[in-house]
Image: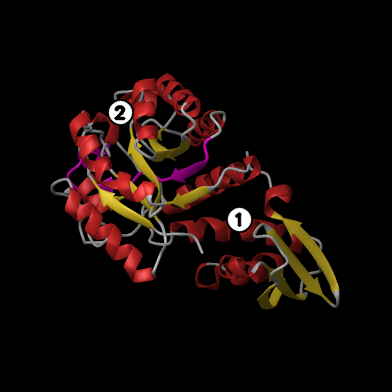
Amino acid sequence: MKQPIVPFFISHRGCPHQCVFCDQVKIAGRGGEFPSASDILAKIAAYRDSGRWRSVDVAFYGGTFTALSPAVQEGLLRPLQPLIAAGEVGSVRVSTRPDAIDAQTALFLREMGVRTVELGVQSMADDVLALAGRGHTASDVELAGHVLREAELSLGVQLMPGLPGDTPEKAMASLMRVMDLRPDFLRIYPTLVIAGTPLAELHANGSYRPLSIEAAVSLCKAMLHRAWQAGIPVIRMGLQPTEELERDGTVLGGPYHPAFRHLVEAELCFDLLRKLAGCLRRGSAVEVICAPSRISAVVGHRRGNVVRLEQICGVRVKGVRGEPALSPSEILVEQGGERLHGDMVRDLAYG
């Protein structure tokens, strides 16, 4: 079983910019002061004790870790050193900006037990970055990626399609350019309009129109598929629901859904089902077989895939069952003892 990550939130701390979309306290549901050494040790101990874990990972989320003062960075990482030496903390990850990483900083992080750095990239289109108030360019991202690779640190990248000035074409181009850096994983967060941000003002005066849920799902479906083809894990799509984020009046616009990734994966499954159904006569009744972890996505949100398959293709789904031997990208459609086989990675194409 994968060991847990003990999270510490340093919302918006260290960041010298106010991006148009950003309110880290509302997004992450955390705020306040930096955790003290005793706070850090107590939280790690509580995680380890609750699951009797031999080792845990530690992550500092939000903010711009490497733009904090050296003393603050060391104050957060120093308490972990005895635990790392004892094997009680397996690895540490931090989040930062592309223009807040250089060779010396990367070396310091590695010496202090950090093994993964997540870069808030958002876009690789310089005009989109400028409109978002990011304060860095795509070239800064590429330089940071190379610096982290030289330091043998794992690289994570966060992308945010749907920012002002963005288009589906720019978002896909950003993904392709980021994948050239060989990141170890991606996070994809479609842009939301959060109350109290500059983007909320642009939305209110009509100068910014966020992606609809349908457009965001369609775009992210293509992005996820391309990442799958490249063998790069997408570890999250859409912001994780928090009490603050789900409070009335927090999200003023944009494609927020607490199960956004499920919607995206369900659309990929439907596209493959529809392709397979094209080989069947209308009025056919079939059983669908997939990896156990894919059953929910195959059925679709509120059984939407099953319903649409009959409405659009005239194919009725008698049942959906799991078969552990199948990979998550494979789907079988069985009729009368005969099976049609499809693979989402191999058999689908977008754009």
Q: Residue at x 60, y 72 (%)?
A: 307
Q: Which residue is mark 1?
A: 268
| x and y percentages locating residue 346 in the rendered image | 73, 48
Range covered by the magenta-colored residues: 183-207
Compared across the picture, whether 226 is left or right of 65 comes to right
Q: Which residue is mark 2?
A: 134
Is residue 249 or residue 107 the one in the foreground?
A: 107
Q: Amino acid at mark 2?
A: Arg
Mark toward the start of the polypeptide (1 vs 2)? 2
Q: Amino acid at mark 1?
A: Leu
Is residue 192 or residue 73 the one in the foreground?
A: 73
Q: Quadrant of residue 274?
A: bottom right
Is disc 2 placed on a helix, strand or loop?
Answer: loop
Give the label on residue 99, or none: none
Alpha-carbon neighbours of circle 2 within 10 Å: few (<14), some, or many (≥20)? many
Judged from this view, the residue extending furthest toward the left is 33
| x and y percentages locating residue 102 in the rendered image | 36, 22
Is residue 206 found inside the magenta-colored segment of the image? Answer: yes
Is residue 119 or residue 133 the one in the foreground?
A: 119
Is disc 1 placed on a helix, strand or loop?
Answer: helix
